[in-house]
Amino acid sequence: MTEKKKHNGPIIKLEDVWKIYQMGKVQVNALRGSSLEIMPGEFVAIMGPSGSGKSTLMNLVGCLDIPSKGRIFLEGQDISELEESELAQIRGRIIGFVFQTFNLIPSLTALENVMLPMTFQGIQRYEREERAAKLLEMMGLGKRIHHKPAELSGGQQQRVAIARSLANDPDVILADEPTGNLDSKTGNEVMDMLTKLNKDGKTIVMVTHDNNLSKYADRIVNIMDGKI
């Protein structure tokens, strides 16, 4: 992996961000003038009830969508008006995703799932294999690298997903309800892994409605009716 330049200001910054959806004749304001700064190395929990706008906020922070109004900066770069191809490159380099539903590709092994994000960054196959194997070993899955998702437990699948999120050594991990499909014991193990990654220098942004997970965060950002 290439050496990255460190960014000194907020790693994520939202300035008066709106997200407006047109549903037929009805206009829905999913986010309404939200501003937020997240510093490098923080562990931030974004909390709110269903429909509050927290998933919309995460999609915007994760470069999966662009705002209707306002500006979003990622490591100082304004991403608000970038083309999809440019957003995809930034996503691949700076952000790793962990989803509630794991989002692993069923036909690929654990190793191949973790290798996949590196493919889009043009990394040589031998380096992809070596790094993916090391990440899975780090997650305690060294003996499961050739298993497909259906052959793994929910907790093991989520650990593969965390390994995949680290494939390109991103600065930010976005976790969307990361324990939502896990029992409490396995969920605690996943949260301990995210906490360790945070202590190792990763910025963690976690979207959740579970108050029990807030204890892991340095800061809680509450969102209600599209407003922070």
Image (cartoon, helix red, strand yellow):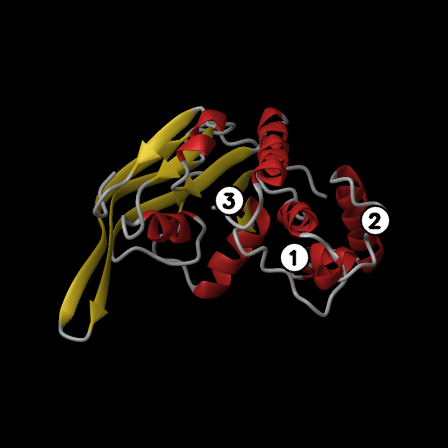
| Quadrant in which the C terminus appears | top left
The residue identified by callout 1 is 117
Q: Residue visible at 50% across and 47% down?
A: 180
The residue identified by callout 2 is 130
Q: Residue visible at 27% across and 48% down?
A: 52
Q: Position of residue 60 (x, y in %)?
A: 38, 52
Q: Earlier in the sequence, mark 3 or mark 1?
A: 1
The residue identified by callout 3 is 175
Q: Is residue 153 left or right of residue 44?
A: right
- Amino acid type, mark 2: Glu
Marks 3 and 1, how far apart in space? 16 Å
Residue that extends furthest to the left in the rendered view of this protein: 25
Q: Would you identify the image quadrant in which residue 27 lies? A: bottom left
Marks 3 and 2, how far apart in space? 25 Å
In this rendered view, identify the residue nearer to me: 11 or 152. 152
SS under mark 3: strand
Q: Residue visible at 58% across and 53% down?
A: 92
